[in-house]
Image (cartoon, helix red, strand yellow):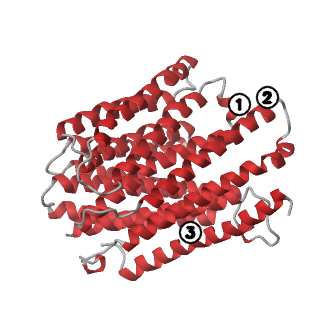
Amino acid sequence: MQIKQRLYELLTLCVLLVMLYAAFNLLSALQTLPALPLDPLLVLSHSRLNVLAGLCAELALLTGFLAGGIAIFQSVTASLADSITHRLRIIYGAWLLLVIAALGNALIQGGPQPLLIVGFGLLLGAAAYILRSGWRLTTLLRVWIVGVGLAAAFLLADLLLGPDNALLYRLRWLVAYPLAGVGLAFWLMRRFSQVSANWVESGAINVGGLLVLAGLLLSMTTLHPAVAVGALLIAPTCYMIFAAHSYRAFSTHNATYTLAGHWLALAIILLGVGVGVLSAFLSLPAIGPLIASSAFVGLRDLLLQWGLLAIVLSLVNQVSAELRGVNRRVTGLMPFWMVSAGVIGGGFVLALTGSAQVYTGVIFGIEAAALESALQPFRLLHALSAFVLACGVAIYALGFWARRL
Amino acid sequence: MKRSEGQGALLPKWGWRLAGGLVALTLTGSILYALLRLGNALLNLTGS
């Protein structure tokens, strides 16, 4: 019973972090609007709020991935050895402390400390190692372990090569996290669909391999122009294969009433557009420098973060319903549509803003300050979509709380 | 099973309540504050 309790606590922590992410994301969008007299928000700068939002998104993602690994492990293992339960308990405790320390540090100093990064890397690696030493190692757990292990390695390498290393950041977000996400996504497909275990296992390996190939190409586009062209051709194809392959699971739904399938479909669409198409296009050598300081960078991050977070929100839906032992929705359709509208609407506005910035600022040479007043309607629309997104997350959290264990 | 009934919980029940309350307050505060800012920005745009 203890392992279920830990799992539920990790899911709760994950939902709390998504709520914080939505709040900081909204405050950050509001900073771009005309300030009020005696504005209380002026205490936190726009860049500080962006750092806080990014940190909360990554912490929520890592917490969700950790919970997902435990959920896969628990679903295939009838009873856990005491030694494994005890070691996992230590990981949980340390994880919670690190999350609190990382948030406190970001609020005070404005960025993650190298020591905290090492802590997260070590804990992720330890969790992957402990679950690897379990009794029954399934293919899905292997995919998850490789993804999380790579994330841990890239986090640790951050300390050796210096913080804010662009290559390590891309490898983490484009290779490690999507791979861990694929492990969870295919495990979820088996819960809400009639697909066979063999189909799920071969799908996870094939799709995982393709996404790693796409992520590696996208991460190394600066090496040679041919790599960028290869990424532009291969990455969208890989993500398209992921979407086409997953369709079978969505079209043969079983009797599960949770919204795990809905959230997973959203995740695949956002990852396909954000990583498969946009990241590949933006990483072309002729385009990269033009968009470096435009809203397109924010658009890519938004789609990537929410694409991966949607997998975690799908997991929260499914696992909490299973832990409660009641086959019904934990969070309803309203938060799903509000989050979808917020991300897709916000993404559309960011694409418009980015296009305006690139054509007027970079190509026609109009100064950014002169352009700013003309961009105000776009800023307002972007803040409105962040508002809808935050309301969606708030309703999601209310649903999770109302149907708690 | 109630969460607080299990032994050796990560946080005591009051700890989860406190954390949940603080986070809910942050999100609700941001949403209410956003209403104020969005209203002000709309008025500015429409020239009222």
Pointers 1 and 2 within a single chain? yes
Question: Could you say whether the residue bearing mark 1 is in a helix, strand or loop?
Answer: helix
Question: How many numbered marks, from 0 up?
Answer: 3
Which residue type does callout 2 highlight? Ile
Tell me whether the residue at label 1 lies in contact with that at label 2, contact meaning CB atoms closer than 8 angstroms: yes
Where residue A34 sits in the image (x, y, percent)? 79, 60
Dot 2, how many residues are within 10 Å of its Cα: few (below 14), some (14-19), or many (20+)?
few
Rendered view: A186 above or below A117 = above
Rendered view: A92 above or below A151 = below
Where residue A240 sits in the image (x, y, percent)? 42, 30
Q: Given the image, what chain letter belongs to the residue carrying mark 2? A: A
Where residue B31 sits in the image (x, y, percent)? 61, 68
Instruction: Find disc 1 in the rendering and name its residue.
Output: A290
**Residue at image location 26% in from the left, 68% down from the top:** A324
Which residue type does callout 3 highlight? Leu
The numbered dot on residue B27 is 3
Instruction: Find disc 2 in the rendering and name its residue.
Output: A363
Closer to the camera, B12 or A123? Answer: B12
Q: Given the image, what chain letter belongs to the residue carrying mark 3? A: B
Classify residue A327 by image quadrant. Answer: bottom left
N-terminal label among 1 and 2: 1
